Amino acid sequence: MAVTQIELDTELLAEVQRISGAATPQEAVEFAVRELVLRNHEGDAPKHAQKLARNWDYDGWRVLNERDRANVVRH
């Protein structure tokens, strides 16, 4: 872990501790940083889906889906 010394808004830090349930200021900062990173990655998911959708072929999917259904063992 990196050791840093930073000045933080004490009211903001207290709010993060309250929201996150963090026992210490360090836990609160780690929570806030982790949350920011997760939210940023969530924004990547729609972009990735959009890339995949560009090459999406409904007719090809339908053929594969019908083939898969034909291979299902029914009891």
Image: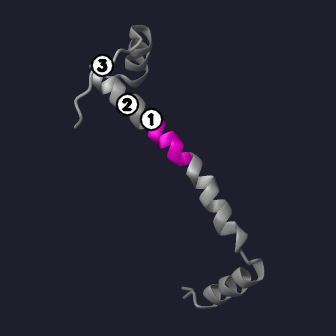
Prevailing secondary structure class for the magenta stretch in the rendered image: helix
Amino acid carrying label 2: it is Phe
Considering the image in quadrants, where does the C terminus appear? bottom right
Among the 4 quarters of the image, the one containing residue 70: bottom right
Compared with 10, 38 (above or below) is: below
Dot 3 or dot 2, earlier in sequence:
3
Q: Secondary structure at mark 2?
A: helix
Bounds of the magenta segment: 36-42
Among the 4 quarters of the image, the one containing residue 60: bottom right
The location of residue 73, given as percent across then percent down, is 54, 88
Q: Which label belongs to residue 35?
A: 1
Q: Secondary structure at mark 1?
A: helix
Q: Nearer the viewer, residue 1 or 46?
A: 1
Among the 4 quarters of the image, the one containing residue 58: bottom right
Compared with 64, 12 (above or below) is: above
- Residue that mark 3 sits on: 25
User: Is residue 48 part of the magenta span, yes or no?
Assistant: no
- Residue that mark 2 sits on: 31
The location of residue 21, given as percent across then percent down, is 36, 22
Amino acid carrying label 1: it is Glu
Q: Residue furthest right?
A: 59
Around disc 3, counting alpha carbons within 10 Å, would you say few (fewer than 14), some (14 to 19), or many (20 or more)? some
Dot 3 or dot 1, earlier in sequence:
3
Gap between marks 3 and 2 measured at Cα? 10 Å
Gap between marks 2 and 1 measured at Cα? 6 Å
Gap between marks 3 and 1 measured at Cα? 15 Å
**Circles 3 and 1: CB atoms closer than 8 Å:** no
Amino acid carrying label 3: it is Pro
The location of residue 61, given as percent across then percent down, is 70, 80
